[in-house]
Image (cartoon, grey):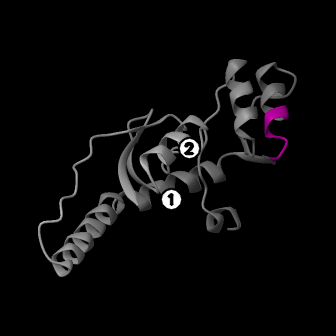
Amino acid sequence: MIVFNLTCGNDHSFEGWFASSAEFERQQHATQLNCPMCGDSTVSKGMNAPYVNIGSAQQAADNAALTSKAAAAQYINIGAEVTRMIEHLIANTDDVGNDFPEEARKIHYQEAPERKIRGSASRDEVEELRDEGIEVVAVPVPRHLLDKPH
């Protein structure tokens, strides 16, 4: 496994684990990589420090534990903020489900009253909406927040 520091088009940093550098490039080319914070699929490799084995297996395990703790600490403060933001979005938008692309077009072309909506759309549908000049933001919503009564 190889770990890359990744950055999305909105400058969010996160880690990605891949079987090889070629596997990263394959997933990147197929736009299978998404930012866990904003859903952006414009993902690129950031600066990476190589790992050099300079000691025993115990020393390597200690280093891995420290790296894991540091990675977890990177996101510890944003969890509550992201949850509050998502809860706010859910409370202040109409859920149109799988009809999202159709409803977004109706609102954009003034065939339906303007309102804030949320729902589901494929990557292709999101690209088509953006090509038409319709602003769309992908927000990954954890299942436990979707199932919560509003």
Which residue shows up at 75% across the image and 41% down it?
121
Q: Which label was assigned to residue 145?
A: none
Which residue shows up at 18% across the image and 65% down it?
53
Where does the magenta region start and end? 97-102
Distance from label 1 to label 2 (Cα)? 28 Å
- Dot 1 or dot 2, earlier in sequence: 2
The residue indicated by pointer 2 is 27
- Relative to the observer, which residue lies in front, 40 or 15? 15
Q: Is residue 37 left or right of residue 145?
A: left
Q: Dot 1, how many residues are within 10 Å of its Cα: few (below 14), some (14-19), or many (20+)?
A: some
Furthest toward the bottom, the residue is 58
* Residue 15 against residue 121 in the figure, above or below: below
When asked about the image quadrant of residue 70, the answer is bottom left
* Residue 101 against residue 150 in the figure, above or below: above
* Residue 74 against residue 105 in the figure, above or below: below
Q: Which label was assigned to residue 83?
A: 1
Which residue shows up at 69% across the image and 19% down it?
131
